[in-house]
Image (cartoon, grey):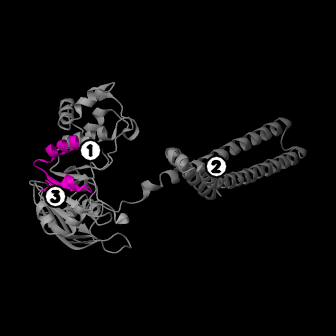
Amino acid sequence: MSKSLVNLSKAHATSESMLSGQIVDSITNATNVRIFARRIYEISYLEKALLLTKKTFQTKEIFAIKLHFMQGLSLSIMIGFMLYFLIQLRMKQVVSSGDFALILGLSVEVGFMTWWAMEQVDELNKAVGKCKQSLARLFIPLEIKDKENARNLSIANGQIIFSAVKFHYKGAEALFDNKSVTINAGQKVGLVGYSGSGKSTFVNLILRLYDVTDGQILIDGQDIREVTQESLRSNIAMIPQDPSLFHRTVMENIRYGRIDASDEEVIQSAKSADAHDFITKLPQTYASLVGERGIKLSGGQRQRIAIARATLKNAPILILDEATSQLDSLTESAIQKSLWKLMQGKTTIVIAHRLSTLMHMDRILVFDKGKIVEDGSHVKLLSQDGCYKTLWDAQVGGFLQDDTYS
């Protein structure tokens, strides 16, 4: 019965978690709710989760009440039998009146203590059920594991080689099939293609967020499956499209790139990223809290913090994933200068839909359905009158048009 109570508590905790998530989601998207006049819909949507939570709560509590009733009934029967035997013993003059009162009193006290102990066990079972649901994710084994004898990655140059790589997501059609490509040390390489063509997957495979199905990915001749994931990622700096900041100080967020960095090194990185000026204008300068996910900063400011963090990390391999796609032209121009300084001397991979940001890359790889269909410099690809030129001609103000509008 205790196991059943644990399972019911787990189910209730799951429904509570789902309800909380939906409430937060609705509040976060309050603007969309107003714009699309979906207040009634959101209420009905939340009511479904609320009803489920109510149902699981009632089921759990009804079971707990039944359990308490059975426990109480068992104790009452036990005390009743004890009282019956005491009366029989007293009538036979086996025990005195004092013994009778003492034994009866102790029996009742033991009964109440047993009742209290069983209640605590029930509450513990409820708590165990909630904890199991809350910690369920932690007990799922990691799909990508280091080998027992994995060594640390040692990078001298930063050359990246895809050797006959095959990859597909679980149950999906192969995205990469026998892909081979070499990115030389210090090269600045742009990745171009429509959404779903394989650009982000290409980068994720380098980071070993997924393992290849077949083939090898080598960095300076070392198979990334043979080295520790921590040493691999410590040698790669990445600036995503929407940098995520911790609700900590500016200093702490930049220092996240290299935890043992001094204040002076953090400030120097901020200067290199053209972030120092706006940071010094904040109420508490580098000690200012940036808010949850950096909400107190503008998009351009968050991007500069991310660049400063990557500058401080100073990894030999740099990955930029749509790092400036959400910025206005003036902010993008300023940040591009910071990024260009950061790229110097590093093997750099840049994913971009705004092709104008890739004009000065050493090389551009054009992806289509998991294949590299073109490879060359901006000038060379334009002269070939192929896929890249088609994409370039389709741009409006530097943005790549989607097939939806063509």
The correct choice, above or below, for 275 with respect to 64 in the image is above
In the rendering, which numbered label is found on residue 189?
3
Mark 1 surroundings within 10 Å by alpha-carbon count, few (fewer than 14), some (14 through 19), many (20 or more): few
| Discs 1, 3 touching: Cβ within 8 Å | no
The amino acid on which the numbered mark 1 sits, given as a three-letter code, is Ser
Dividing the picture into quadrants, the one containing residue 327 is top left
Mark 3 surroundings within 10 Å by alpha-carbon count, few (fewer than 14), some (14 through 19), many (20 or more): many
The amino acid on which the numbered mark 3 sits, given as a three-letter code, is Val
Relative horizontal placement of residue 187, taking residue 286 as reference (left or right): left
Q: Which secondary structure lies at badge 1?
A: helix
The amino acid on which the numbered mark 2 sits, given as a three-letter code, is Asp
Q: In front here: 40 or 156? A: 40
Tell me the residue that label 2 is attached to.
122
Precedes in sequence: disc 1 or disc 3: 3
Relative horizontal placement of residue 88, taking residue 41 as reference (left or right): right
- From the top left corner, tell me how far across and down residue 292 is, in percent: 40, 39
- Check the picture and name the quadrant holding the C terminus: bottom left
- From the top left corner, tell me how far across and down residue 39 is, in percent: 60, 48
Tell me the residue that label 1 is attached to.
329
What is the C-alpha distance between the residues marked 1 and 3? 22 Å
Residue at the spot x=19%, y=70% of the render? 386
User: Magenta residues?
Assistant: 332-361
Dividing the picture into quadrants, the one containing residue 174 is bottom left
